[in-house]
Image: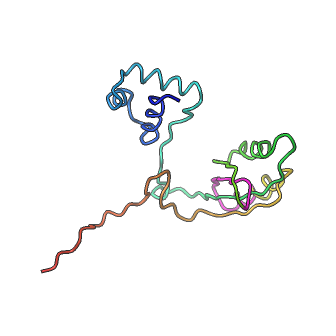
Amino acid sequence: MRKLEMSILQILTEDARTPADQIAIMLGKSEEEIRETIRRLEEQRIILKYPALINWQRVDVDEVEALIEVRVTPQRDHGFDAIAEQIYRFEEVRNVYLMSGGYDLLVMLKSQTLKKLALFVAEKLSTIDGVLSTATHFVLKRYKSQGVIMDERTEDRRLQVSP
């Protein structure tokens, strides 16, 4: 990957709303070259989406978020990929990662209620052939996400000066 492409990806990762003309100025390139490079990165599916990071704790929405550790038996000729694909096709699932360590897959999902999440694990996830066991962990509070502190305190951090 060229240096220009990497620089554009880093800028867009930091702030996906950075306009092409500003990126051009930052990198000393023409706006047209930046637009063309971004278009090519989108066509190659290197850039997939431009997400916003939302602090859902400040929004009056009841949702349950969970991380589920999944132990599986890899399938012949497909390894973990076939089971991972079955899992990531469920609407509730947000992320699926192949992991090293005590479990094989990490599944992250959101649900409207604890009951719906429990039903997902019991009726959908655990019934997949090759799934050996699951361990569910609920997100109680998010402190930092994607490098952003969610509730940074605005208190005065200056040292006190005493007479």
Residue 3, x across and y down, in percent: 46, 30
What span is in magenta?
A: 102-120
Q: Residue furthest left?
A: 163
Residue depicted at 77% across the width and 44% down the height: 86
Residue 72, x across and y down, in percent: 80, 54
Residue 116, x across and y down, in percent: 70, 57
Residue depicted at 33% across the width and 26% down the height: 28
Count of numbered badges drawn on the protein = 0
Q: Is residue 114 part of the magenta span, yes or no?
A: yes
Residue depicted at 69% across the width and 45% down the height: 91
Q: Quadrant of residue 29?
A: top left
**Image colouring:** rainbow
Q: Is residue 124 above or below residue 12?
A: below
In the image shown, does 108 or 120 lie closer to the viewer? 108
In the image shown, does 103 or 145 lie closer to the viewer? 103
In the image shown, does 152 or 123 lie closer to the viewer? 152
Horizontal placement of 138 versus 150: left or right?
right
Q: Quadrant of residue 118?
A: bottom right
Q: Residue furthest bottom?
A: 163
Q: Is residue 126 part of the magenta span, yes or no?
A: no
Horizontal placement of 13 versus 104: left or right?
left
Residue depicted at 43% across the width and 42% down the height: 14
Horizontal placement of 158 versus 150: left or right?
left
Q: Is residue 37 above or below residue 68?
A: above
Q: Quadrant of the C terminus?
A: bottom left
Q: Is residue 43 above or below residue 118?
A: above
Horizontal placement of 126 versus 109: left or right?
right
